[in-house]
Image (cartoon, rainbow, N blue to C red):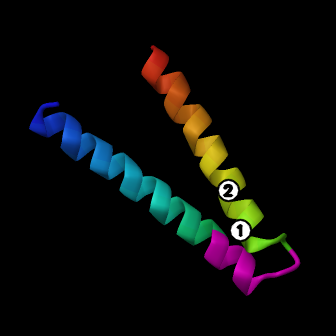
Amino acid sequence: MSMLTKVVALLIVLVFALTFGAIAYVTHRHPHLAGPINTGFTGLALLTAVLAIIATR
């Protein structure tokens, strides 16, 4: 695995973590939106789907 691949993988993991954290924080601050953990995982699932579509092109 080259250094560039490792850096890109690290950046993808960081984006996923920040996305999960942001969605969980927003839903924690506004509980009427949904459960924080479930909404965070839903956001990660959507991000994963978009990443899979991009990777297959």
Q: Residue furthest bottom?
A: 29
- Give the residue at x 84% y 70%: 34
- Count neighbours of disc 2 (C-alpha within 10 A) and say few if under 14, some if 14 to 19, many if 20 or more: some
Assess whether residue 17 is covered by the magenta stretch.
Answer: no
Q: Residue at x 78, y 82 (%)?
A: 30
Residue type marked 1 = Ile
In the rendered view, tell whether residue 54 sits above or below residue 22. above
- State the residue position of label 1: 37
Q: Seen in the image, is 3 located left or right of residue 17?
A: left
Q: Do the residues labelled 2 and 1 touch (CB within 8 Å)?
A: yes
Q: Is the magenta stretch mostly helix, strand or loop?
A: helix
Quick check: 42 above or below 35?
above
| Location of residue 53 (image quadrant) | top right
Rate crowding at label 1 as few (under 14), some (14 to 19) or many (20 or more) other CA atoms within 10 Å: some
Along the horizontal axis of the image, is 47 left or right of 12? right
Q: Which residue is drawn at 39% across and 52% down?
A: 13
Q: Element at badge 1?
A: helix
Q: What stretch is highlighted in magenta?
A: 24-32
Callout 2: SS = helix
In the rendered image, residue 3, in percent from the top left (x then y), is placed at 11, 39
Above-or-below relation of 2 to 14: above
Q: Residue under circle 2?
A: 41
Most distant residue in the right direction: 32
